[in-house]
Image (tube, helix red, strand yellow):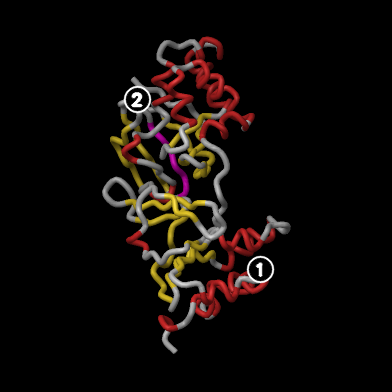
Amino acid sequence: MGCHTRNMFKTIACDCDLHVLADSIVQAGLKEAIATTPNITVFGPKNKALCKFLQANPGADLASVLTYHVLPESLKAKDLVNDQKYVTLSGDSVRANQYSCPTFNKVTTVNGVPLSEKNIHASNGILHKIGKVLVPPTGTVAQIVTENPDFSILLQAVLAADPAVLALLSDPNANLTVFAPTNQAFESLASELGLSLAEILALPNLTNILLYHVLSLSLGTVFSAAIREGKTKNVPTLAEQDITFCRCGKKIYIKDANDRKSKVIGADVLVTNGVVHVIDKVLLPL
């Protein structure tokens, strides 16, 4: 029997990368639904990724986790629209992204996770393999900054800046890429400039500094998988000044207009209105 004639469950079960997924589908009581629901798209976490997730989350609702990986429409990778959110069978949405050269790697992602093997046909839909379990985002950029104590100084800066900054970070319909400096990053900046934190928060160009940490809205959400090896210059920000991406393997740095480098120490924090990358140095425009 050719693979294209197997139903989705059999397609998953006969793939050596997806045995844990097949077992989990059976355990969750979803075998019949996955086998017979017409026109579905499945993002299938590979064995290692799903094992790691299940070990770290032993009390997880398996049915909810798995149905979050299923769309009620059959979509090839090329049909996924950049920065569109697709409602899954769990009721939560996943974010698709299409990136292209020369600015970015040519890659398709879902919640920032690359599709490692695309367009596997089953009789009732399309399967894409992924190397990580998808988890729904919780909260906007503003909520993440508000609730995480590591960003308490960033929160003070946002509140001290033009109210438009907070409005942007709170916008549920935005597609934002934000580089978020930690408290230590702000403390280092104060030392670098010979200023107190209070003086940093009173800088006349504080709003522009914060907007320099948000990519131009025309770029949408930029996950780490999109960032090319080497340097990518002239990446626009909302401060109307560019930054440079510098990548060496898994290490990613952001170079500002003053040739200062900030390291990404926490990539791909998924939020409902975009993605946050945690950085260890405040970026400064000219």
> Three-letter amino acid code at disc 1?
Ala
> Which residue is outermost to the bottom?
1
- Say which residue label 1 marks: 28
Q: Residue at position x 58%, y 76% from top?
A: 32
**Of 163 and 128, which appears nearest the observer?**
163
- Say which residue label 2 marks: 239
Magenta segment, which residues? 250-255
**Of 229 and 128, which appears nearest the observer?**
128
Residue 118 in picture, x, y percent from top left: 40, 67
Image quadrant in which the C terminus is located: top left
- Residue 165, label in figure: none
Relative height, residue 134 to residue 196 (above, below): below
Secondary structure of the magenta portion, mostly?
strand
Residue 63 in picture, x, y percent from top left: 63, 63
**Of 43 and 71, which appears nearest the observer?**
71
Residue 201 in picture, x, y percent from top left: 51, 14
Q: Residue at position x 44%, y 29% from top?
A: 168
Image quadrant in which the N terminus is located: bottom left
**Of 193 and 206, which appears nearest the observer?**
206
Q: Quadrant of residue 283?
A: top left
Residue 147 in picture, x, y percent from top left: 62, 31
